[in-house]
């Protein structure tokens, strides 16, 4: 992986986000029926439906065709936790070793090691790492900071899926929606890490190659100073801490909203539904989605807003959750005659 693969990775991720966002945007637009508007909207509704929004069908076999149990939501967060943890450890290790002046640059065996990872000469990688400007070092540590926020999010959602929500045994979701969720929890942490992931991977490759050449006995002992793992994070700019505050605010509201939704079905195996109330439910039908918009906005702010792939990630989050919220809002209005008409779908006074 060469030094120029960072932008290439970001462009690929941007294309992936555009490909995922455009169908949802098309389904939300008022496209004439003659131009396939109703077909596109119906198709996206079917793909994105889950739980209560799955449209009833004439037979149970047709209802379960191309669907999986809604409790498979757990898979999203398992995948997200594995991917995010792997990226966080790799980039944090790289930041600790090379973005702070703690360890000496490799001098011996560099020729063989650099050739094993595709280097052109014995000094290319050493010069690359040692010449990083301060702004780049801050960028790497910002990535660590944002990945920590993402790690908190996926681990919390993993816990909530297992211990807070009580999915009905009959609750299903479309296989396309399931695969979209898997895609999201792979692509989202990759997008957050894309600006420095290639160089972090190259550094790890270099270390592995050096280990192969030198052997364990001739490698220096790895000494980890916990204070140096955290000090650079504490020295980041105000943007990161404002983003963290927004993230925490959104997370706290999502925790409360999920607790409300989970309590509605506690110890119930039926498909009975009631109108949720409390917290942001007084203003919108899907406050847990609104809270997710808020906390991902916090991640965007914490990232510094300089990575285009993070912007495209957030655009997908807005489009996807808004579409899902509108469908859920319509379901509430159809299901309950006394449903509060003053509630919006996801964003107060907007939609």
Image (cartoon, rainbow, N blue to C red):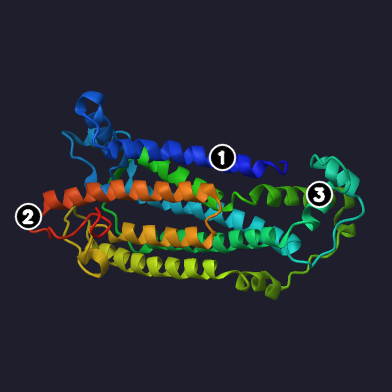
At x 20%, y 28%, the residue is 33
Q: Where is residue 87 in the image (x, y as percent from the top left)?
A: 60, 54
Would residue 82 appear left or right of 73 to someone viewing this image?
right
At x 33%, y 39%, the residue is 25
Circle 2/circle 3 CB separation < 8 Å? no
| Residue 95 visible in image | yes
At x 20%, y 40%, the residue is 55
Residue 11: image tag: 1
Q: In this view, does 157 lie above or below 229?
A: above
Q: Position of residue 246 (x, y in %)?
A: 43, 67
Disc with the residue nearer the chain's start (1 vs 2):
1
The residue singled out by tag 2 in the image is 337
Q: Residues within 10 Å of mark 2 (few under 14, many from 20)?
A: few
Q: Looking at the image, is mark 1 or mark 2 nearer the viewer?
A: 1
Q: Looking at the image, is mark 1 or mark 3 nearer the viewer?
A: 1
Q: Distance between the residues labelled 1 and 3?
A: 24 Å
The residue singled out by tag 3 in the image is 125
Would residue 53 appear left or right of 139 to someone viewing this image?
left
Residue 160 or residue 236, whichever sits in front: 236
Report helix, strand or loop for mark 1.
Answer: helix
Report helix, strand or loop for mark 2.
Answer: loop
Q: Distance between the residues labelled 1 and 2?
A: 48 Å
Q: Where is residue 258 in the image (x, y as percent from the top left)?
A: 31, 63
Report helix, strand or loop for mark 3.
Answer: helix
Q: How crowded is mark 3: few (under 14 residues within 10 Å), some or many (20 or more)?
A: many
Circle 1/circle 3 CB separation < 8 Å? no
Disc with the residue nearer the chain's start (2 vs 3):
3
Q: How far apart are marks 2 and 3 (CA)?
A: 67 Å
- Outermost residue to the top: 34
């Amino acid at each position: 992986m060469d030094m120029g693969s960072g932008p290439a990775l970001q462009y690929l991720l941007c294309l992936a986000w555009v490909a995922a966002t455009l169908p949802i945007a098309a389904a939300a637009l008022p496209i004439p029926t003659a131009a396939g508007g109703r077909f596109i909207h119906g198709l996206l509704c079917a793909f994105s439906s889950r739980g209560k929004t799955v449209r009833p069908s004439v037979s149970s076999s047709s209802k379960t065709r191309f669907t999986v149990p809604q409790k498979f939501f757990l898979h999203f967060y398992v995948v997200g936790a594995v991917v995010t943890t792997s990226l966080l450890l790799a980039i944090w290790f790289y930041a600790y070793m090379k973005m702070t002046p703690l360890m000496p640059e490799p001098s011996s065996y560099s020729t063989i090691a650099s050739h094993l990872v595709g280097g052109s000469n014995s000094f290319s990688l050493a010069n690359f790492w040692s010449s990083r400007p301060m702004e780049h070092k801050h960028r790497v540590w910002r990535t660590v900071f944002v990945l920590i926020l993402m790690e908190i999010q996926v681990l919390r959602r993993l816990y909530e899926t297992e211990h807070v929500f009580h999915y009905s045994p009959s609750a299903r979701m479309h296989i396309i929606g399931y695969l979209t969720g898997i895609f999201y929890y792979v692509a989202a942490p990759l997008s957050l890490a894309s600006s420095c992931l290639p160089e972090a991977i190259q550094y790890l490759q270099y270390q592995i190659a050096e280990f192969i050449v030198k052997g364990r006995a001739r490698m220096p002992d790895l000494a980890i100073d916990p204070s140096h793992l955290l000090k650079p994070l504490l020295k980041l700019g105000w943007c990161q801490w404002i983003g963290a505050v927004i993230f925490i605010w959104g997370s706290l509201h999502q925790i409360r909203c999920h607790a409300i939704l989970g309590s509605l079905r506690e110890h119930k195996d039926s498909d009975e539904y009631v109108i949720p109330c409390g917290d942001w439910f007084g203003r919108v039908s899907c406050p847990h989605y609104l809270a997710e918009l808020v906390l991902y906005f916090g991640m965007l702010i914490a990232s510094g807003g300089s990575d285009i792939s993070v912007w495209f990630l957030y655009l997908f989050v807005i489009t996807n959750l808004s579409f899902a919220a509108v469908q859920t809002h319509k379901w509430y209005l159809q299901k309950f005659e006394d449903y509060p008409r003053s509630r919006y779908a996801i964003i107060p006074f907007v939609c």
